[in-house]
Image: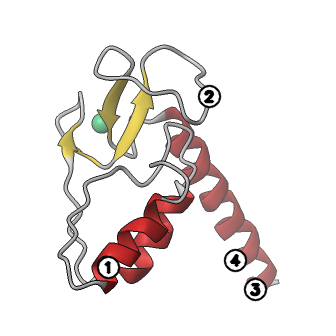
């Protein structure tokens, strides 16, 4: 989403005009898009839809098919594919880190 798009849409909404937005929330690197998160703070309704991962599970994430990409590299299905948390490499790393931290914290709490 373009810089300033959230403020422009919020302004339009404040004028009594209904605004519908469809967007992904996270980059292929799992970084949130700031404009989308700003807009979601003002949303009166949010519906999250999923695609289908190559494994058949619900896919909430976007994965690059062409290796490392810049944060704002625009592309279609030639460049990106939907992925679930189990099939997305960055999500797996994130889950491993969360599991590790939970185990460490549990160890601290039980010590
Ligand atoms: Zn999957």
User: Residue at coordinates 19% horizontally, 42% vertically from top-left?
Assistant: 51
Query: Is the residue marked 3 within 8 Å of ligand 1, measured from its CB?
Result: no
With respect to residue 70, does 109 lie above or below? below
Pick the residue in front: 53 or 24: 24
Q: Are the residues flagged by discs 1 and 3 in contact, CB closer than 8 Å?
A: no
Pointer 1: what residue? Answer: 43
Q: Which mark is residue 106?
A: 4
Q: Secondary structure at mark 4?
A: helix
Q: Quadrant of residue 71?
A: top right
If you read the primary sequence from the N terminus, does the residue marked by circle 3 or circle 2 appear first? 2
Q: Which mark is residue 70?
A: 2
Query: Is the residue marked 4 within 8 Å of ligand 1, measured from its CB?
Result: no
Distance Cα–Cα, label 2 vs label 4: 36 Å
Distance Cα–Cα, label 1 vs label 3: 39 Å
If you read the primary sequence from the N terminus, does the residue marked by circle 2 or circle 4 appear first? 2
If you read the primary sequence from the N terminus, does the residue marked by circle 4 or circle 1 appear first? 1
Residue 109 percent coordinates (x, y): 75, 86
With respect to residue 65, does 105 lie above or below? below
With respect to residue 71, does 81 lie above or below? above
Residue 90 percent coordinates (x, y): 56, 39
With respect to residue 104, does 77 lie above or below? above
Q: Are the residues flagged by discs 4 and 3 in contact, CB closer than 8 Å?
A: yes
**Of marks 4 and 1, the one in the foreground:** 1
Pointer 3: what residue? Answer: 109
Tell me: 1 left or right of 101. left
Q: Which mark is residue 90?
A: none
């Amino acid at each position: 989403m373009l810089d300033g798009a959230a403020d422009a849409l919020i302004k339009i909404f404040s004028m009594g005009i209904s605004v519908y937005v469809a967007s992904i929330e996270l980059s292929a690197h799992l970084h949130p898009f700031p404009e989308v998160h700003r807009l979601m703070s003002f949303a009166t309704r949010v519906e999250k839809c999923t695609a289908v991962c190559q494994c058949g599970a619900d896919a909430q994430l976007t994965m690059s098919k062409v290796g490392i990409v810049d944060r704002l590299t625009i592309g279609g299905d030639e460049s990106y594919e939907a992925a679930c948390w189990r099939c997305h490499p960055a999500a797996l790393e994130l889950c491993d880190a969360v599991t590790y931290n939970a185990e460490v914290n549990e160890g601290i709490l039980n010590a």
